[in-house]
Image: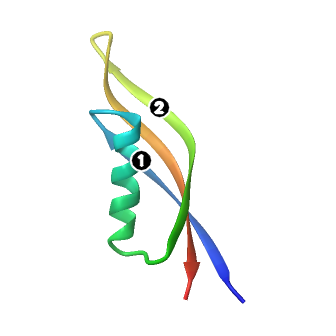
Amino acid sequence: MSVAKNIEVIASSTTSIEDAVKSGVAKVGETVKNIQGVWVKDIKAVVSSNAVTEWRATLAITFVVD
């Protein structure tokens, strides 16, 4: 029998949404094993002087528990 768990994190990037997602998964992967998938639940852009300066992605990361 397998058991999976979800954790929710917010990751950011000054480059792109894709970079925020990839860096978020990589950071969680430093301490969590068996990551199976990621769901991008929400995206937010930080604006300064009428320009996007940072992307933030709310991620639900699923992993299988040993």
What is the count of numbered marks? 2
Residue lying furthest right: 1
Residue 6 sits above or below residue 10 on the image: below
Q: Residue at x 44, y 78 (%)?
A: 33
Q: Is residue 30 above or below residue 61?
A: below
Q: Quadrant of residue 26?
A: bottom left
Percent across and percent down for residue 35 are: 49, 70
For the rendered model, the colour scheme is rainbow
The picture places residue 59, in percent across and down from the top left corner, at: 51, 51
**Image-based side of 66 in relation to 10, left or right:** right
Q: Which residue was labeled with disc 1? A: 21
Residue at disc 1, secondary structure: helix
| Residue 48, label in figure | none
**Viewer-nearest of labels 1 and 2?**
1
Q: Are marks 1 and 2 in contact (CB under 8 Å)?
A: no
Indicate whether 43 appears above or below 59.
Answer: above
As shown in the figure, which amino acid type bears the numbered disc 1?
Val
Residue corresponding to mark 2: 44
Q: Residue at x 56, y 39 (%)?
A: 42
In the rendered image, the quadrant that contains the C terminus is: bottom right
Compared across the picture, whether 2 is left or right of 25 comes to right
Tell me the CA gap for discs 1 and 2: 12 Å
Rendered image quadrant of residue 24: bottom left
- Hey, what amino acid is under mark 2? Lys
Quarter that holds the N terminus = bottom right
Residue drawn where x is 47% and y is 31% of the image: 44
